[in-house]
């Protein structure tokens, strides 16, 4: 027989929902802001004058399937 001993396996501690929730809300709001700029910032209902934001996210709009012209 062999004299092999096994070390105990460390079990990860669960993360409480109260610690995840603020980060999940922050991430969700950040995604909504990005979706606004990519999806609707076109000039007619734009927050910024000109087409600078539209041109910056133009290829991303086509990649995500938003029509723009």
Image (tube, rainbow, N blue to C red):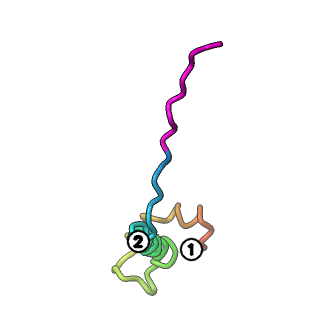
Under circle 1, the secondary element is loop
Magenta span: predominant SS is: loop
Closer to the camera in the image, 65 or 35? 35
Report how many numbered discs are placed on residues in the image.
Answer: 2
The image quadrant where one finds the C terminus is bottom right
Q: Position of residue 4 (x, y in %)?
A: 57, 19
* Quadrant in which the N terminus is drawn: top right
Q: Upstream in the sequence, badge 1 or badge 2?
A: 2
Specify few, some or many for label 1: CA neighbours under 10 Å numbering under 14, 14-19, or 20 or more. few
Residue 54 visible, this angle = no
Residue 18 got which mark?
A: 2
Residue 14 x %, y %:
47, 58
- Coordinates of residue 40 in the picture (x, y in percent): 49, 79
The outermost residue toward the right is 1
Q: CA distance from mark 1 to mark 2?
A: 41 Å
Give yes or no for contact between labels 1 and 2 (Cβ–Cβ under 8 Å): no
Q: Nearer the viewer, residue 4 or 50?
A: 4
Provide the residue span drawn in magenta: 1-10
Answer whether residue 49 is magenta in the image. no
Mark nearest the camera among 1 and 2 is: 2
Measuring 49% from the left and 72% from the top, which residue is drawn there?
35
What residue do we see at 60% from left, 73% from top? Answer: 67
- Picture quadrant of residue 34: bottom left
The question of residue 8 being in magenta is answered with yes
Q: Is residue 2 visible?
A: yes
Which residue is label 1 attached to? 68
């Amino acid at each position: 027989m062999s004299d092999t001993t096994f070390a105990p396996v460390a079990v990860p501690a669960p993360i409480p929902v109260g610690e995840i929730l603020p980060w999940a809300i922050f991430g969700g709001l950040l995604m909504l802001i990005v979706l606004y700029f990519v999806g609707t910032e076109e000039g007619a209902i734009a927050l910024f004058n000109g087409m600078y934001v539209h041109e910056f996210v133009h290829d991303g709009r086509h990649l995500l399937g938003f029509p723009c012209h």
